[in-house]
Image (tube, rainbow, N blue to C red):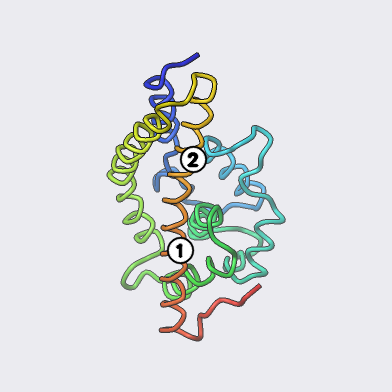
Amino acid sequence: MKSNEERLQDLLAYVDSLTPVHPSEIPGIDLYMDQVTTFMDSQLAASKRHDDDKILTKTMINNYAKNNLLPPPEKKKYTKEHVLVLIFIYYLKSILSISDIQGILNPITEKYFGNDENYSLEDIYKEVFSLEHPETQNLMKDLAKKFNTSMNTFPDASEDEADLLHTFSFICMLSYDVYIKKTLIEKMIDQMASKNPETKPSKK
């Protein structure tokens, strides 16, 4: 059985492996749908929960287009900007509804997709990407703190009970953190919608 320190190091190593797609790794040429799904699957494989999970499917892409999340392809080909939008959708859909993702992405795509007068969509992705490394370091420090705190809960528990209770405490701490951040994100989306009623997402 692994020690608590070994378990923590495994968790931190896993978090460190979940790096977003680097801007330089995104193809600069237009891709057909099969090429898009293959690219996404290879680049984000580390985030799969199960080996047979699909990062992105043709059905997903068609649904995103149907819900006005993804601009239509050009002659059945997807540009680098399409791939950037799909990457944003992938990260957001793990915690947000389609309508909330609309509220975040639609103002961005409407203003910057295919338009590089001030900022291009690639400029925006690169800027956001640059925040990833320091944020990951902060997250790992917070993760270690929560883990160590949870390992000190239920000091009177028997050895048989301790592992289950400690793990449950850790999961609850992480869940509360996600709950607070998700609620804050939803509040910000609602504020964006109130300022721009024409981009208000539908309640589906």
Residue position for label 2: 171
Return the x and y of residue 192 as percentages of the image width and height: 42, 77
Q: Residue 93 carries which label?
A: none
Residue depicted at x 40% and y 22%: 4
Real-space CA distance between mark 2 and mark 1, rounded to the nearest whole angstrom: 18 Å
**Three-letter residue code for mark 1:** Thr
Disc 2 crowd rating (10 Å Cα; few below 14, some 14-19, many 20+) is some
Quick check: 82 left or right of 187? right
What element does badge 1 sit on? helix
**Three-letter residue code for mark 2:** Ile
Vertical arrangement, residue 151 with respect to residue 183, above or below: above
Return the x and y of residue 101 as percentages of the image width and height: 53, 65
Residue depicted at x 62% and y 42%: 38
- The quarter holding residue 21 reads top left
Return the x and y of residue 170 as percentages of the image width and height: 45, 37
Q: Which residue lies furthest to the top in this view?
A: 1
Question: Closer to the observer: label 2 or label 1?
Answer: 2
Q: Residue 183 carries which label?
A: 1
Residue depicted at x 61% and y 68%: 72
